[in-house]
């Protein structure tokens, strides 16, 4: 495995060994949770895929047990109500039963369905993309209540926000920060200059996991962020309340998060491609 890359299924220890150079804060403590044989929990469906003729699997993010992979038996039978209830973007209250080889979902109730205007393609796509991204980033069964909270806040905000990209940028950078993968946003990774004092663009070099000041970034490849975007990013990473940003800054922050994640995660983030296409479409009117 190349330095700075990690497989989704690597052990947690392995992930940290690979990632230590990029982590700015203290290495995170992962909260492995042992579940009882049967629990009643609430969670948001991140993703679903099919199994066998009538069943499906869902990836359910819960605040207290983390991300659970759960089988829903009979969900695809025409008479089953379970199918609709366990679609992505639904927050459900459900029983999760530990079977011999797998977890089973039973008696789900819908608590809330995010982005109810399913005709709003941009909001819907962003909401689904956030869920898919989180599904890829999180290891199974590690409690991440703050990560869950960020998803809930982001999905709620996406329903009405004037600038959906800013919400997406906020969620992505909050997650990177909470999971301990965020590069240092305060200082240039080469000369140590304070990036908040710079008037010129900073450059994120995803392959090295560093931000560079304009001088050190000259001639380098990366994602450029304006001084204003850099200040918004610093606020996001510090966990300060969401502020506003110019549309172009919000877009470059999303692009920076995705490029960075793409280079630190082994599997390419599919929605980077989707994102570029959406922007091209917008630009062409
Ligand atoms: Zn520098």
Image (tube, rainbow, N blue to C red):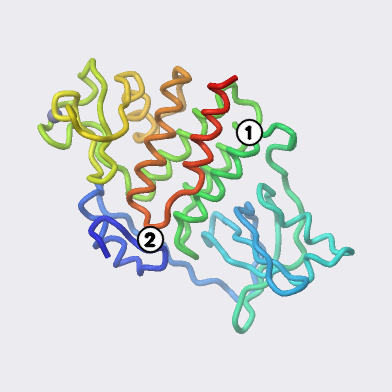
Q: Earlier in the sequence, mark 2 or mark 1?
A: 2
Residue furthest to the left in view is: 191
Quarter of the picture for ligand 1? top left
Which residue lies at the image location 27% right of the left edge and 41% below the top edge?
183
Kindly report the distance in space between the C-alpha atoms of the residues bearing marks 2 and 1. Answer: 31 Å
Q: Which residue is mark 2?
A: 30
Q: Position of residue 83 (x, y in %)?
A: 78, 60
Q: Quadrant of residue 92?
A: bottom right
Q: Position of residue 238 (x, y in %)?
A: 34, 34
Tag in front: 2 or 1: 1
Residue furthest to the bottom in view is: 100
**Left or right of residue 104, residue 16 in this image:** left
**Badge 2: how crowded within 10 Å, few (<14), some, or many (20+)?**
some
Q: Secondary structure at mark 1?
A: helix
Which residue lies at the image location 47% right of the left edge and 41% below the top edge?
272
Which quadrant: the N terminus? bottom left
Q: Which residue is mark 1?
A: 123
Q: Position of residue 17 (x, y in %)?
A: 24, 62
Which residue lies at the image location 65% right of the left edge and 59% below the top edge?
48
Q: Secondary structure at mark 2?
A: loop
State yes or no: Cβ of the residue under disc 2 lies below 8 Å from any atom of ligand 1.
no
Q: Which is nearer the eye, 162 or 225? A: 225
Q: Which is nearer the eye, 126 or 167? A: 126
């Amino acid at each position: 495995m190349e330095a700075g890359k990690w497989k989704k299924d690597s052990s947690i220890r392995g992930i940290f060994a690979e990632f230590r150079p990029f982590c700015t804060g203290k290495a995170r403590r992962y909260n492995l949770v042992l579940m009882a044989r049967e629990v009643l929990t609430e969670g948001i469906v991140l993703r679903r895929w099919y199994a066998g003729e009538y069943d499906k699997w869902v990836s359910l993010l819960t605040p207290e047990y983390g991300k659970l992979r759960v089988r829903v038996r009979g969900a695809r039978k025409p008479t089953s109500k379970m199918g609709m209830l366990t679609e992505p973007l639904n927050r459900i209250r459900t029983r999760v039963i530990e079977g011999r080889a797998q977890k089973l979902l039973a008696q789900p109730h819908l608590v809330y369905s995010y982005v109810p205007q399913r005709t709003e393609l941009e909001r819907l796509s962003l909401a689904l993309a956030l869920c898919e991204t989180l599904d890829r980033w999180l290891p199974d069964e590690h409690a991440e209540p703050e990560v869950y909270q960020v998803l809930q806040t982001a999905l709620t905000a996406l329903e009405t926000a004037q600038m959906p990209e800013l919400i997406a940028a906020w969620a992505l950078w909050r997650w990177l920060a909470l999971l301990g993968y965020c590069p240092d946003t305060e200082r240039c990774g080469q000369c140590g200059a304070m990036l908040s004092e710079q008037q010129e663009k900073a450059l994120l070099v995803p392959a090295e996991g560093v931000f560079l000041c304009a001088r050190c970034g000259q001639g380098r490849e990366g994602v450029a962020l304006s001084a204003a975007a850099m200040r918004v990013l610093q606020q996001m990473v510090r966990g300060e309340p969401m502020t506003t940003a110019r549309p172009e800054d919000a877009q470059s922050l999303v692009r920076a998060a995705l490029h960075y994640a793409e280079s630190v995660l082994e599997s390419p983030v599919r929605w980077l491609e989707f994102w570029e296409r959406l922007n091209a479409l917008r630009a062409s009117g």
